[in-house]
Amino acid sequence: MKLLPKATLIDVIRGKATLIGSRTDPNRPRGWVSPVEARALLGLEYGDLAEEEAAYLDADHSLSDQAATTARALLARLFSAGDPAVDLPRPTLVATPVDNITIEEALRRIVEPPPTHRARMVHFVHPHAVNLAATHPDFRTLLERADLILPDGIGLRFAAQILGVSLKHNINGTDLLPLLCEAARDNQLPLLLVGGAEGVAEDCAATLRNSFPGLDIPWTHHGFLNGDKSKDLAQRIAEHPGAIVLVGMGSPRQEQWSWDHLAPIPRITVVTVGGLFDFFSGRIPRAPLAWREAGFEWVWRLKQEPKRLAKRYIVGNPLFLSRALKQRMTQGKPKG
């Protein structure tokens, strides 16, 4: 979403504008910040931001809430600061290309009829996956072969900013799944869930069935699979043409398993989703919206699973950004 120009601080001081006001509706008083500014700048455009902005402005808010809203907007501006960025359709970020598309376009491409001779392969990539691709050529090749590579998280957006590339949206699986469930239900496409510990995928499916009546989830399966079980499961999946198969095993295992066992199956769409089932099963709480708007969802996740994620975030995030800086210094800013 392109925001309207912000009011100046001088206008706010003089009483000609408000500190928090509209940057989506020209008919409303303009503000120095908008209550949805953080989400717009960070590419988290899930839902109707103009409608949510209006609802916020029509309600009363405490000084602490207004201060937090302002702080999140300023943090988002900081993340988005820099030279004017170039809009490329499939830029390479450190070690893998990503499809620079909107949330709506990603959803459309996932639910449209898949190829008749093979599976459509869709991967989300985040800093951890890109770090793996930088040191594992085979994994990088799998990502490059995918039909769709979606940029997931603030880290990818920050790296793009360093490289002088403008990413349209932050397309993460947790926010996209509700929209995908609606689209699957409306298009009568079955949804299959494979991955997680015993019972996690089924609990996730129960949540989704309850939230989206009419959604067809024929069955689920845990992610602990040997060779024979993988072959049997692939045969079961092949019995559901048109299905969208969500595979949650963590990178790089989920991508490798999907290419080994599901890629040859015609007329299905495979989407690798990492730990998505844990969130929707209720086993791991997701970061509150305020944390996500501030770009700190990774901090929340680290707080929830410090032993598992400490190396990934504390070591991996700086390593990823250093690789982005190196790419910028060696290759310069891309030309549009």
Image: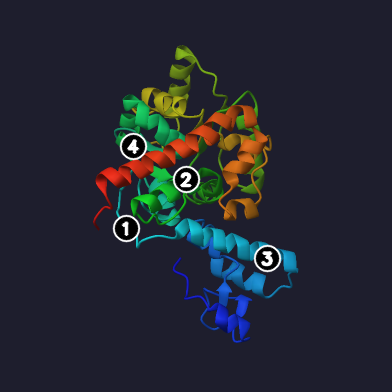
Residue at 46% across, 65% down: 1
Neighbour class for label 4 at 10 Å: few (<14), some, many (≥20)?
A: many
Residue at 46% across, 29% down: 251
Q: Indicate whether 123 appears above or below 22.
A: above
* Amino acid at circle 2: Gly
Frontmost of labels 1 and 2 is 2
Question: Between disc 4 and disc 2, whose residue precedes?
Answer: 4
Mark drawn on residue 155: 2
* Amino acid at circle 1: Asp
Q: Quadrant for residue 95, please give it.
A: top left
The residue nearer to you, when weighing 13 against 157, is 13
Q: Which residue is mark 1?
A: 87
Please state, as top left, top right, bottom left or bottom right, where the C terminus lies in the image. Answer: bottom left
Neighbour class for label 2 at 10 Å: few (<14), some, many (≥20)?
A: many
Say if mark 4 contacts mark 3, CB within 8 Å.
no
Q: Which residue is mark 3?
A: 67
Q: Quadrant for residue 307, please give it.
A: top right
Neighbour class for label 1 at 10 Å: few (<14), some, many (≥20)?
A: some
Q: Which residue is mark 4?
A: 95
Real-space CA distance between mark 1 and mark 2, rounded to the nearest whole angstrom: 18 Å
